[in-house]
Image (tube, rainbow, N blue to C red):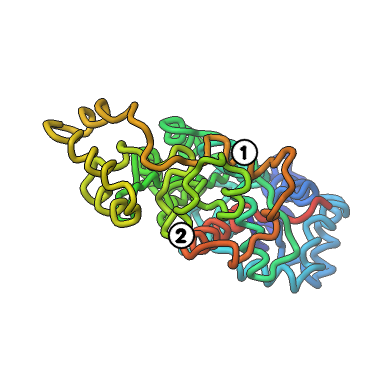
């Protein structure tokens, strides 16, 4: 995260010089160590060109800590570019109360005493490897925006299913870390609503906690739908329905494939019937199965063991793409560009890339 330390904290630390308890001094030391370890992008504009202030702080903190806090001022042009590219930033100040206004999260460290701005951002996803994929989206965003002066730093958290909601609830209640969650929509067709995992996750953010946010994919079903088609074909199961890439793969279950389970809702049925025109008998089978079903649960019992209409590319698709053992890469995720993505993917890679970059950007370790 781009974290800016206001001059009022520096002044408060100097004014309390000699006191046993000097919270502002302790914050400055912790943030200097954070900068050294490359956990966030730390900026202290008040130090830029101010030799007198540096000298005063040097006596209080030690010159090595001041050098760490002043590091990004020596990369001023890159720092300005970075500040203008992020969609959110943190400002440490004792003049304002903790909270978010627009794209600025103000944190008063004297007020929010348990919050640890020096700890790297936590990234909560449904599986641990998901955050690794999303870091590629952040790099894609950086390439598009011409950002070269930083890296990503984060601690991955896993929260599949109901666990995701519980982990976010804990992060909100603790108010101890910055936490970004990225979740699948699990939509079966474009106008479908997001499902339970995403919906319950968003519910945890109703109180607008300053330290947590979430992004829910909208234009695709789940993370596997973000994989470029050539990588799906290269690393997925050979029996997968490759023809889906000639129409709209955005809501196709890349792991399982298209099943009768997906077709309970009439809108889903109509959507998929319009895309897949060579399986009329299988769609008629859905019409037969749904007869006399009083609810969705009854329908699922009838169709859960029925053969797929079109096969997917296997449960290990994402893992194979991220760790292509024994495969010759046909495309490096580090080099993905617009030409490798369809329209829906471009939108999601940009959106996820921007929020992931904004919440996890950091200086290289000093």
In depth, the one of 19 and 112 nearer the eye is: 112
> Would residue 231 appear left or right of 197 to someone viewing this image?
right
Q: Secondary structure at mark 1?
A: helix
Tell me what residue is drawn at x 52 percent, y 37 percent. 314
> Would residue 353 appear left or right of 185 to someone viewing this image?
right
Q: CA distance from mark 1 to mark 2?
A: 24 Å
| Mark 2 neighbour density, 10 Å: few (under 14) some (14–19) many (20 or more) | few
Tags 1 and 2 touching, CB below 8 Å: no
From the top left corner, tell me how far across and down residue 258 is, in percent: 38, 42
Tell me what residue is drawn at x 54 percent, y 44 percent. 179
For label 2, the residue is: 246
Q: Secondary structure at mark 2?
A: helix
Q: Residue furthest right?
A: 63
Q: In this rendering, is residue 259 above or below 12?
A: above
From the top left corner, tell me how far across and down residue 181 is, in percent: 50, 45
Tell me what residue is drawn at x 46 percent, y 60 percent. 246
| Mark 1 neighbour density, 10 Å: few (under 14) some (14–19) many (20 or more) | some
Q: Which mark is residue 319?
A: 1
- Occupied quadrant, residue 116: top right
Q: Can residue 50 be seen from the camera position used here?
A: yes
In depth, the one of 280 and 27 nearer the eye is: 280
Quadrant location of the N terminus in the rendered image: bottom right
């Amino acid at each position: 995260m781009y974290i800016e330390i206001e001059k009022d904290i520096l002044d408060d630390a100097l004014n309390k010089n000699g006191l046993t308890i000097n919270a502002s001094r302790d914050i400055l030391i912790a943030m200097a160590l954070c900068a050294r370890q490359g956990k966030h992008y730390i900026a202290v504009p008040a130090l830029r060109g101010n030799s007198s202030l540096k000298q005063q702080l040097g006596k209080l903190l030690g010159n090595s800590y001041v050098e760490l806090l002043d590091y990004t001022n020596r990369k001023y042009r890159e720092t300005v570019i970075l500040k203008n590219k992020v969609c959110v930033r943190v400002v440490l100040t004792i003049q304002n109360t903790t909270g978010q206004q627009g794209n600025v999260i103000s944190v008063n460290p004297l007020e929010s005493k348990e919050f640890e701005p020096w700890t790297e951002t936590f990234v909560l996803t449904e599986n641990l490897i998901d955050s690794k994929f999303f870091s590629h989206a952040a790099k894609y965003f950086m390439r598009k925006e011409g950002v070269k002066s930083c890296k990503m730093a984060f601690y991955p958290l896993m929260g599949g299913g109901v666990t995701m909601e519980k982990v976010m609830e804990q992060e909100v209640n603790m108010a101890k870390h910055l936490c970004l969650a990225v979740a699948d929509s699990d939509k079966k067709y474009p106008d479908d609503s997001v499902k339970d995992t995403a919906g319950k996750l968003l519910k945890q953010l109703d109180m607008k906690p300053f330290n947590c946010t979430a992004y829910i994919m909208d234009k695709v079903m789940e993370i596997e739908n973000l994989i470029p088609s050539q990588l799906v074909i290269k690393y997925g199961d050979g029996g997968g329905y490759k023809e889906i890439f000639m129409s709209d793969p955005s809501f196709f279950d890349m792991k399982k494939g298209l099943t009768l389970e997906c077709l309970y809702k009439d809108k889903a049925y109509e959507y998929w019937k319009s895309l897949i025109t060579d399986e009329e008998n299988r769609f008629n089978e859905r019409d037969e199965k749904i007869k006399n079903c009083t609810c969705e649960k009854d329908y699922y019992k009838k169709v859960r063991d029925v053969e797929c209409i079109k096969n997917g590319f296997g449960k290990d698709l994402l893992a194979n793409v991220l760790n292509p053992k024994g495969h010759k890469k046909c495309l490096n995720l580090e080099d993905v560009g617009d030409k490798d993505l369809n329209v829906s993917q471009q939108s999601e890679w940009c959106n996820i890339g921007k929020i992931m970059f904004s919440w996890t950007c950091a200086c290289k370790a000093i």
